[in-house]
Image (spheres, rainbow, N blue to C red):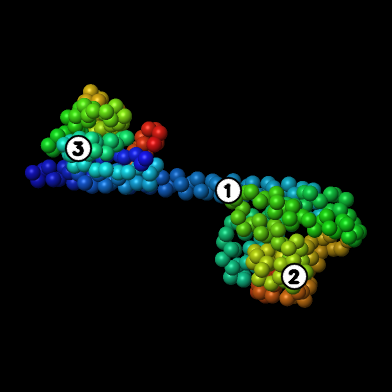
Amino acid sequence: MEADLVARLEEKERQLERYAADLRETFKAERARTAELHASYMATVRALANAVEARDAYTGHHAERVAAYGLELARAAGLALANDPQTEFGFLLHDVGKVAVPDAILFKPAPLTDEERVLMERHPVIGWEILRDIDFLGDAKLVVRNHHEHWDGTGYPDALAGEDIPVAARVFAVADTLDALTTDRPYRPAGSFADARELIAAASGTQFCPAMVDALGAVAEERLEELRAGIA
Amino acid sequence: MTRSVLIVDDDPFIRRLIATTLEDVAGFHIEEAGDGVEAVEAARAKEPAIVFLDIDMPRMNGIDACRALRALDGHAEAMTIVMLTAAGPDAEAAARAAGADLFLTKPFSPLDLLQLVDSLGA
C-alpha cells in the first residue's frame, strides 16, 4: 500500500517536472522570438528611414541624431515613453512623408512659394497615411503626423495647441530643431549647441512646449556632443 | 454546439492538469470521470468528441473501458479515444488493440497534448 502511494507520488512528480520543463522551454523560445521580432521591426524602421534620407545628402543621419536627442530629452523630462520602442520608431520615421515631396521643392535653395509650401507641409499627413496600417508602430504615427505642430496652435497639419499635441511630438519638435540648428545647411554653417539652446528657449511657449524646452536645459552640452559623436 | 472532452483518470491531479491545459482551447466543454465505469456513463450522456483514457485504473481499466466505449450505440465511432499509457511498445500495442486512436505517454508534455488536440482539428 505504501509502495503504491510512493509510486503514485513519484508519477505526479515526474508529470509536474515535465510541465515545468516545457514551460521553461516555451518561455525561452518566446523570449527569443520576441527579441527577434523587435530586431526585425527596428531593422524595417531603419531601412525605411534610411530610404527617405538617401535622397537628401545634407541631412545625412538626421533621423538617427534626432531620435537620439529626442529619447534623451524624453528621459530628462521623465516621460515613460522614453522606454517605449514606438517612440524611437516615430522619431526615426518622422519625415517619411517627404518621399512624396518633389526634389525641386525639397532641395530648393531659395524660399518656397506659397504653393510649394502647401505641398511641403503635406508631408506629415502623407507620412501618417503611409504608415497608417502598420499596427506595430502604434503611437509612432502621431509623431509623424504632429511633429510640426506649435505649442501656440500655429503649426500644421492639425493646428493642435498645448497638451492636445501628443507628448512624443512635442518632445520631438525640440529635438528636430536642435539638430537642424546644429548641422550644416547649404545656406549656413552649423551653429553651436549653446546658440541652438538659446534660440529654442526663446520660442518656449510659442513654438515649443515649455516642459520640453526645460528638459533640453537639463541635458548637459557634453551629453549632446556625445550623442552626436555616437552616430557615424 | 459546444464539443465535449472527457478526461478519465483515477488521479484527480492528472485530470486537473489535462483540464487546465485544454481550458480555453477551442472552447471545449470539459467532463471528468474517475474510472472506466464512470467513463462509459459519462460518454453515453455527454457524447464527447475526444476521450482521454488512462490505461491503468481501478474498477474498470482503460483497455476494458475503451472496448466498452467502442461498443456504445450511435456515438462510438465519432469519438477519438486517446489512451494515456506508460512508456513502451507493449502499452501502445494494447491501446491500439483495444480500439484507441492515439496514445499519449505519461509523463506527457503539455505541448504534445495541445498539438494532439490541434491535429484533431479542434
**Image quadrant assignment for residue B112:** top left
Quadrant (top left/top right/bottom left/bottom right) for the N terminus of chain A: top left
Disc 2 marks a residue whose amino acid type is: Gly
**Residue where numbered disc 2 is placed:** A153
Q: Residue at x 18, y 39 (%)?
A: B38
Q: CA distance from mark 3 to mark 2?
A: 74 Å
Occupied quadrant, residue A195? bottom right
Few, some or many C-alpha atoms within 10 Å of disc 3 (few <14, some 14-19, many ≥20)? few
Q: Name the residue that disc number 1 marks.
A: A39
Element assignment for label 3 = helix
Check disc 1: other Cα within 10 Å, few if <14, some if 14-19, many if 20+: few
Q: Residue at x 18, y 46 (%)?
A: A9
Marked residue nearer the N-terminal end (2 or 1): 1
Chain holding disc 1:
A
The residue tagged 3 is: B41
Q: Residues within 10 Å of mark 2 (few under 14, many from 20)?
A: some
Q: Name the kind of residue labelled 1 in the image.
A: Ala
Q: Chain of mark 3?
A: B
- Kindly state the secondary structure of the residue where label 1 is placed: helix
